[in-house]
Image (cartoon, rainbow, N blue to C red):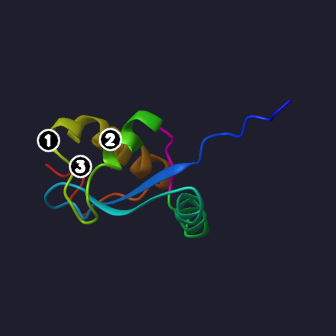
Amino acid sequence: MSRRRPPPKNAVALHYDGKGAPRISAKGRGIVAEEIIALAEAHGIPLHEDSELVTLLAQLELNEEIPRELYLAVAEVIAFAYMITEKFPPGWGKK
């Protein structure tokens, strides 16, 4: 009887400075994904699991802006990160 191993983890890191669209800052599978996740945890960067979104983002090149079709999904992740860290970009919420 063989044991099923879970599929390797995938990870994609985004960088967003409030200007333009978020960019892919790191991506990897297996050990590289685990290192990306460990670095994020070590630096207090919020993590969000969404295998479908990661699959789509992993197809992009490093430093590439996310496509318009993914803006809403990524905006929800960024809003989630802002809320749980209570850190917001300059000018956020000003009228």
- On the image, which quarter does residue 6 sit in? top right
Give the class, few, some or many, for how many residues have Cα within 10 Å of label 3's Cα (few <14, many ≥20). few
Residue positioned 32% across, 47% down in the render: 57
Q: What distance separates the C-alpha of mark 2 from that of mark 1? A: 12 Å
Q: Name the residue under label 1.
A: 68
Quick one: 71 or 54, which is closer to the camera?
54
Q: What distance separates the C-alpha of mark 3 from that of mark 1? A: 23 Å
Q: Name the residue under label 3.
A: 93
Residue 88 x, y percent position in the rendering? 34, 57
Quick one: 3 or 39, which is closer to the camera?
3
The earlier-in-sequence mark between 2 and 1 is: 2
Residue 3 x, y percent position in the rendering? 80, 35
Q: What's the amino acid at mark 2?
A: Leu
Left of 79 or right of it: where is 2? right
Residue positioned 35% across, 44% down in the render: 79
Left of 76 or right of it: where is 2? right
Left of 5 or right of it: where is 52? left
Disc 3, SS? loop
Q: What's the amino acid at mark 1?
A: Arg
- On the image, which quarter does residue 55 sit in? top left
Give the magenta range: 46-50
Left of 56 or right of it: where is 5? right
In the rendered structure, find residue 17 and report the number of the disc placed on it: none
Marks 2/1 in contact by CB < 8 Å: the verdict is no
Q: Mark 2 points at which residue?
A: 56
